[in-house]
Image (cartoon, rainbow, N blue to C red):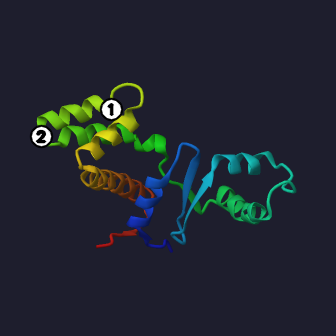
Amino acid sequence: MVARVSLRDVVDELDMLTDESTAYLNRKTGELCTIQDDDIRLIEDDRSLDDLPEWERDDIPRMREVLESEDWLILPTRFDIHEWAIMDEFARSVDNPDLSYELMDAIRGTGAFRCFRNAIHRHGIQESWYQYKDAALAEIAIEWLDEHGIPYARET
């Protein structure tokens, strides 16, 4: 039987992803696990674990299980999420035309993420941005969960 997963937990996991990590969901238990790319390479290379600190050696069997079991599915990655597109959609959704234009301008060119973050803080709209981003991540999570036939619970 497929476990019902928490939509909030999946969204939080997606929000914490980096370019150097991959998140997994156990389709049977609903458990989530994120593994750093360095750890994946370590396991795939089958190198000696003797040089690793004990705490890291203790995590290897669990990570190996996640990587080798068909019960664990890869969640959407940062590349699947397209945060820049979410920022662009948010900028276009802002009612104030001057602010909308400033946000769209902030995400053009080098340092787009930093410039966007500075702009939303300067205008005090960071909470609106976080809510918008959270809703966009929830849509991505719901689409992915539905595609894989995994039931989920929405928390209120």
Q: What x and y, as percent, mark residue 19?
A: 54, 42
How many marks on residues?
Answer: 2
Residue depicted at x 57% and y 50%: 22
Of 63 and 93, which appears nearest the observer?
93
Q: How many C-alpha atoms fall within 10 Å of the one at disc 2: few (<14), some, or many (≥20)?
A: few
Residue placed farthest to the front in the image? 122
Q: Left or right: where does residue 120 sit relative to residue 16?
A: left
Q: Secondary structure at mark 1?
A: loop
- In this rendering, the answer to whether 22 lies above or below 9 is above
Element type at mark 2: loop
Which residue type carries mark 2? Asn
Residue at position x 55%, y 58% in the image: 24
Viewer-nearest residue: 33 or 127: 127
Side of 156 where 32 appears, left or right: right
> Residue tagged by mark 2?
96
The disc placed on residue 107 is 1
Q: Is residue 11 above or below residue 85?
A: below
Residue 55 percent coordinates (x, y): 75, 65
Q: Is residue 45 left or right of residue 65?
A: right
Identify the residue at image location x=78%, y=62%: 57
Give whichever of 62, 36 is nearer the camera.
36
Residue 29 location, quadrant: bottom right
Image quarter of residue 10: bottom left
